[in-house]
Amino acid sequence: MVSIEIDGKKIEAEQGSMIIEVADANGITIPRFCYHKKLSIAANCRMCLVEVDGVKKPLPACATPISDGMVVKTQSDFAQQSQKSVMEFLLINHPLDCPICDQGGECELQDVALEYGNDVSRFTEKKRAVVDEDLGPLIETEMTRCIHCTRCVRFGREVAGIRELGAVGRGEHMEISTFIEQSVDSEVSGNIIDLCPVGALTAKPSRYQARSWEMAQRDSVSPHDCIGANLHVHTLRNRVIRVVPKDNEAVNEVWLADRDRYSYEALEKSERLLKPMLKHNGEWKEVDWETALERTASKLNMTVQTDGSDQIAAIAHPSSTTEEMYLLQKVMRGLGSNNIDHRLRVTDFAWQKFEPLHPELGVDLSELENLDACLLIGANLRKEQPLASLRVRKATRYGDVASIGLYPVYHNFDLKHEIITDAETWLGQLAGITKYLYQNQDDSDKEQWADAMDLEGLEELLAPINIRDEHRDIAEMLLKGEKSSVILGASALEFSYAGHIRLMAKAIANLSGASYGFFPHGGNSVGAYLAGAIPHRGPAGADVEQDGQHIKDLFEQGKKNYVLLKTEPGKESVMGEQALNSLRSADFVVSMTCHADDEAFEYADVILPVASFLETSGSYVNVNGLWQDFAASVNAPGEAKPAWKVLRVLGNLLNLKNFDYVSAEDVRKEVKGRLSAVGDRIKPKWQCPEKLPRDGFSPRPVNMYQIDGWLRRAPSLQDTALAKGQEVLKRPRLSPFHNIVGGV
Amino acid sequence: MTDSETKTLNEILSAESFQQVETWVRKYPEERKRAAIIPIMLIVQDECGYLTQDLMDAVADYLSCPKIAAYEVASFYSMFRLKEAGKYVISLCTNVSCMLAGSGDIKKWFEDELGIKPGETTSDGTFTLKEVECMAACGGAPMLEVDKKYHENLNVDKVAELIKELK
């Protein structure tokens, strides 16, 4: 620690930090354009010039490390004169078209110009004009406004790991450009809009929709992956204009994935269902809520009475809120049925009893970037959990990452070891690593594991397995790392022997001292487990008298009645066609959906319009078990109602007990109350499987912009190269280091 | 725009040139080999005349660096040509020293006699005139460079002589 003085204020700070960091941490404002706390230091805008005692020239605060006894003045005449001069230079080629610029009102250049700019320009020569770039459907450009801070360039190289933009040309002719005609295809590309301090890069879908000062800002949470990225939703007259990130270091840092940012488009750009619909003699007609719900209640009641409660089934999409799923299971269980599931893309349920209380990552999201060793199993992180991928990329600065999967995947980080295997030998590969670790354990270690694992049978199971060099390397990598983690991704969970994969992964983690966890599908799978939207456990992991049937059985056997919550199983289930067949031949199907073009019109009997994720209050629980609740940002259109209200009324109509909630918060309190009552009763178990089957099957991975109804209906996202499967996969891997070491 | 369509650097270059490329790459540590991007692009330019997108892509792939990084370098330095040029590319310095010593007259001579302004090529495709920044020969200002050779202490007559020789 050294002590310095800024503007007369004595400050203790870490040796080596830059003046601007210390000033920021102490609430002293220094103007800047190119400096950003998440990016490397470029020091190219010179806006942050300050005076340092004993130095004759002004120094850039962003690139000047502090030293003991340094006296910094940010407000002296000398400093201000320097800043004013820089401002004058920056404005030479800026068009000052603020009245027609989307950034107007929230523009860093505008703000700083107000403070430091002159009223009258001395520049009478011609300003330059720059031809705009076409960066694809998400980002609008107005390159004449660019002040060459290069934040967007550095974001691509350092954070996203995909460099598409560059500074082309020299001097007066320098332009930020892709040089060739090419869209920006990164799955986190929208962040350069937030980074751009001027109006050069703005959001294309919301262009000219509103001025920044007219909009109201509400908070929400993204439903598309289990990170639970925090959103600021900007609304105007009950319309969502755009979505930007809300800073939360523990969750999404300052970033959003493109799908978090642009999925709101579906609220207005898709055809919404505005009234309850009922099929009468094969014809769809609009009805009032009462008719639709009464029909639903009487049908469900009738089926339970005539065919028994195992003939009704409920399927929820894992992006439904915790409250919705809790009420859905309460309706089902109230009717005496445990047939409820949300695991649309899971195929193996054999080991579900061995699961923990809820899916969990085993390591804090914010700790992902500090891992020494990380083994990814069947994970295409960039597509499945874009923001977690950015963290793991950071981990590769000092740590190692290995991957075992079925498909060659372009990761935006370097892999130390990579095994691309096939379905037949996948388990064998994991067993190889397990065997190496098992053989290198002392007996005392084995005793220690005995608590968590029933090691019986493991030796026999592993006997025929050959340890290959890469198995040894990966095992050593995990052993060596102080903070190591084994993390499973989508294709591991979708595999037909997912249970075996999980057992082997858990064994590897336990034997190597690594943490173990996985990223489940959808935004709220954790909430689904806690709410009891699973057939084998009630809310908060409560025991059920008799297990309900899991989703595979529900679709394979065909039930009389189906209740669907925000899901289109034909598009979302791994069983696609079979799911559709069962739904078509069902006696009665009710679907709660937001969309007028829902596939349910093909097979349902009653379709109920419900509110979307930005139109309802509720909560999502992320992969670290973090509850994040939110209120509605806008009202639902037409007669659409939040699904929790619909389910509450349905519960009342079915004469079920305790269905008189006033708010989503009431429901949430009930779930949380049950959780605290149960405590940590459920302990994940480990038992050695009898054999390692070789006839596994893996469903085809689903496109990252197809996973839920909102993304499928967000036109700008559907227009991207990623959605169309046209992205360039052969790219050089870029070092995650900032500047100096190994940078391009 | 699939990757398979672009040729690799050793398919593009002659064996001899490619050997030069490899010599340059060996001068840098493996993980810093992209430092050789300027000499390599010069070798490619010498052999192919000017740098097309395909050529720059091939260099970027060869050095495992993003393609845009190659475009940045090629568009920054004046010795790289991104368009077809004449048989002789004349780089005329018009920076301060040369300007004071009369580079303006020489520039005008090119316009009057050959009919080309900076950036243009004669209709017979023989000469291309380029206006460049200081080439570190201020002691011999005004100067120009053609075919990697500096011609210093110039005046209009000397330039006329030089052009006659080249023709």
Image (cartoon, rainbow, N blue to C red):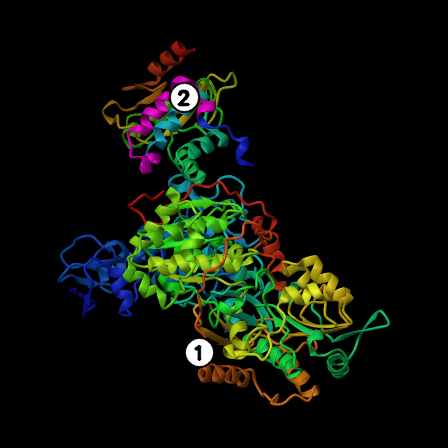
User: Which amino acid type is marked by label 2?
Assistant: Asp
State which chain disc 2 sits on: B
Q: CA distance from mark 1 to mark 2?
A: 74 Å
Q: Quick check: A583 left or right of A79?
A: right
Q: Position of residue A74 (x, y in %)?
A: 24, 63
Asked if the magenta segment contains residue B21, the reply would be yes
Residue A374, quarter of picture? bottom left
Q: Nearer the viewer, residue A725 or A328?
A: A328
Asked if the magenta segment contains residue A567, the reply would be no
Residue A242, quarter of picture? bottom right
Considering only vertical position in the picture, is A179 above or below A23?
above
Which quadrant of the rendered structure holds the N terminus of chain B?
A: top right
Q: Nearer the viewer, residue A68 or A654?
A: A654
Q: Nearer the viewer, residue A297 or A715?
A: A297
Q: Nearer the viewer, residue A647 or A126?
A: A647
Q: Position of residue B140 (x, y in %)?
A: 25, 22
Residue at 38% in and 51% down: A435
User: Which amino acid type is marked by label 1?
Assistant: Arg
Q: Which residues are magenta?
A: B10-34
SS at circle 1: loop
Which quadrant of the rendered structure holds the C terminus of chain B?
A: top left
Q: Disc 1, disc 2: CB below 8 Å?
A: no
Residue that mark 1 sits on: A681
Crowding around mark 2 (Cα neighbors within 10 Å: few <14, some 14 to 19, many 20+) is few
Residue at 61% in and 89% down: A660
Does any portion of residue A546 appear in the rendered image? Answer: yes
Q: Which mark is residue B46?
A: 2
